[in-house]
Amino acid sequence: MKTARSSQRADCVVIGGGLFGCTIAALLRREHGCSVVVIERESVLMRRASYNNQARVHLGYHYPRSILTGLRSRVNSSRFMREYAECIDDDFTMYYCIVRTMSNVTAAQFQAFCERIGAPLEPAPGPVAAMFESNRIEAVFRAMEPAFNAVKLAGRLADELAIQAIEVLFETEVRRLSPSDAPGARLAVHAENRGTGDAMRIDAQFVFNCTYSNINTILARSGIERIPLKQELAEIALVEVPDEIRGVGVTVMCGPFFSFMPFPPRGLHSFSHVRYTPHHEWHDVVHAIDNQEYMDRVPKHTNFAWMQADARRYMPLVDQFKYKDSLWEVKTVLPQGEIDDSRPILFQRDVGIPGLICVLGGKIDNIYDVDAELVGVLSERPA
């Protein structure tokens, strides 16, 4: 079938309508006056990696082996909760538990870390501590860490893009990037509507590749060397918890353990396990595949039974969890995060083609770390 073709111009094209893509697009328009087009493969915003995760607003507790990540989380999360207050669910209590053996930190080390980054922490009440197996758990602490509602957040971001008059091309896939021959542009984005097959071209000064697990897919299609990234097919189980812990979240650390907490969009709890949430892994520099397409077609079988069997050894109430569903996504891991469990942000400029920027963050509040980077990038714009 012959497809229609169209072309247009923009200062910036943002590929990916997740939290990072939408926020960067809004910043480019609001703070820097750029004309912006957002290209999103799905039919709505924030329905891939921005939705398919544990929805934790990190306040630093999770990173006792990376003081920088902990500190940045404290700073960024405060801003995130202030700006998106209506999207935050803090109607539950989070508890952090330190395991006696196989943990990378002791209870004393965890307390010292939290004190150092200014994260509130106190011993859990006796009835709560009694829910855990004391021969396996060294200490239980009460923390302050909420969740975010990805559906509400998507609505808020959609409203902001509309207010800023930013065009969003839904159900559109970028086929490749190339240097542009148009005056005043550096890149050409070649895309296609997934429903109609209509082809389009957008010429721009800058392109922001914010496609998370598919960053390297776009680079490979464009003949650009891939960035060393590890991918994991990850499962977050969604469960009903017993009434005693309906208003509770628990994170057991620091090692091959588990976590559960409210998942606001579904009225359930998410349940993950360091050992059983990843089903398998691969490296983009070795396996050049379309990671989103792979995730959609690969057979998926839940590891919930394995998660539950291990977690009940530490908290017997886990035996009463009722499995309902699973969230599946390809999780992308930067090499540095493998070493110290940190969550650095990737902001790589001029990747293969001048003006192409690849952006990847390991958690939602990483988004605020891009502000200064955008100023540096846009300083290159012609007067």
Image: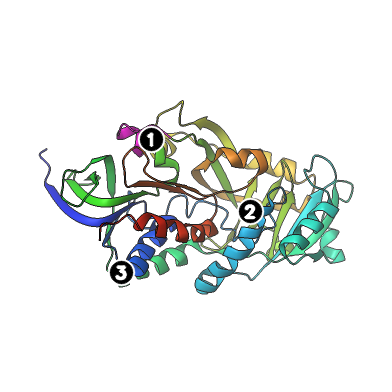
Q: Quadrant of the N terminus?
A: top left
What whole-number distance in Å separates the C-alpha atoms at marks 1 and 2? 30 Å
Residue at 76 percent across and 53 percent down: it is 317
Q: Which residue is mark 3?
A: 162
Q: Residue furthest top?
A: 286
Classify residue 328 as left or right of residue 203: right
Q: Residue furthest right?
A: 135
Q: Which residue is mark 2?
A: 69
Q: Amino acid at mark 3?
A: Ala
Q: Amino acid at mark 2?
A: Thr
What whole-number distance in Å separates the C-alpha atoms at marks 3 and 1? 30 Å
Q: Secondary structure at mark 2?
A: helix
| Viewer-proximal residue among 166 and 376 | 376
Look at the picture and state if 111 lies above or below 210: below
Residue 277 seen: no
Q: Residues within 10 Å of mark 3 (few under 14, many from 20)?
A: few
Q: Which residues are magenta?
A: 218-226
Residue at 52 percent across and 43 percent down: it is 331
Percent position (x, y) of residue 307? 67, 42
Q: Secondary structure at mark 1?
A: loop
Q: Residues within 10 Å of mark 1 (few under 14, many from 20)?
A: some
Residue 370 seen: yes
Task: Give the number of the disc on residue 290.
Answer: 1
Percent position (x, y) of residue 17? 37, 55
Residue 178 sits in quarter: top left
Percent position (x, y) of residue 251? 71, 53
